[in-house]
Image (cartoon, grey):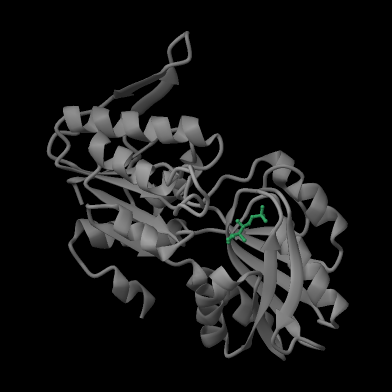
Amino acid sequence: MDKLAVVTGNAHPELAKNICKYLKIKLSECLVGRFSEGEIRVKIEENIRGKDVFVIQPTCPPVNDNLMELLILCDALKRASAKRITAVMPYYGYARQDRKDQPRVPITAKLVANLISTAGAERVLTMDLHAGQIQGFFDIPLDHLFSVGVFVEYFEKLKLKDLVVVSPDVGGIKMARGYAKRLGAGLAIVDKRRISPEATEAVHILGDIEGKNIIIVDDLISTGSSLIEAVEILAKHGAKEIRAAVSHGVLCGSAIERIDKCKNLKELLISDSIPLDNSKKHPRIKVLSIAELLGEAIKRIHNEESVSSLFD
Ligand code: R5P
């Protein structure tokens, strides 16, 4: 492991430290600051020549700053003769614009993939992508992790009976099926319509949820609209206890106020792919760590072992 190095920008240093703790290595010294006009200033403070470097930098809000830090870090590492650079983005920002669903719109998920490769990253490690096909936007190897095991371990301890896993929209069925299979639960879907980037409407429920304990699963919670709409329609149709497991807690706008008002939501579990600052903490939000999952994947990539067998 002496050829392995982990560096971080300012997106999520705590996660980087926890990954290093799992790997039993020291986080590499690295300055990621700002020049007086606001430009990003990076300096790798130790010899990185010939190392297999993993840059831990989820592209969460502030998205543009975090993305730019990642690009500049990759450039600095490339010029410092790192042997290989892996961009570790447990949360991949700009993912939701992944196709031309209207005239004259960009495909930012592809643009960001191009930027990351151009900056010098030779591999990507990510988790619960908004859409699996984003993997194909990269022409470099990408390892795609799933947080389902982390959440399922928690739910198994609750020993919930009459369990139904619910996807808050049609796009999330695959993820919901994965949870349902592991938990031996039923499956249901909420038919969601998006009214605007910030607002959604839950129209129908497909599946039997009356009197059942519910786990809503999703890849991300942003404004909270999709989740809260799903909770309310499920409660209206007679669901019992309603919990949610969401991989990435973006939690922007009035998400926390919405969660606070939604008493039908018993518990929201998120991973620590994105740091949860104090303004986003809430007694019904619980954070489960993915540091070990990422650490183990990094170890296997470095040792050229199978990553997919992590999910067997
Ligand atoms: C949609 O396709 C996603 O999986 C999420 O359901 C959605 O992006 C969450 O956004 P919001 O919290 O703003 O409804």
13 over 291 or under it: above or below: above
Residue 129, image x and y in percent? Answer: 45, 59
60 vs 81, nearest the viewer: 60
Q: Quadrant of residue 188?
A: bottom right
Q: How many marks?
A: 0
Q: Is residue 29 visible?
A: no
Q: Quadrant of residue 31?
A: top left
Q: Is residue 155 visible?
A: yes
Residue 149, image x and y in percent? Answer: 49, 73
Ligand 1 is located in which of the four quadrants?
bottom right
Q: Residue at x 28, y 34 (%)?
A: 74
Q: Residue at x 25, y 30 (%)?
A: 75
- Residue furthest top in the image: 36
Residue 171, image x and y in percent? Answer: 55, 69
Q: Residue at x 77, y 62 (%)?
A: 228
310 vs 191, nearest the viewer: 191
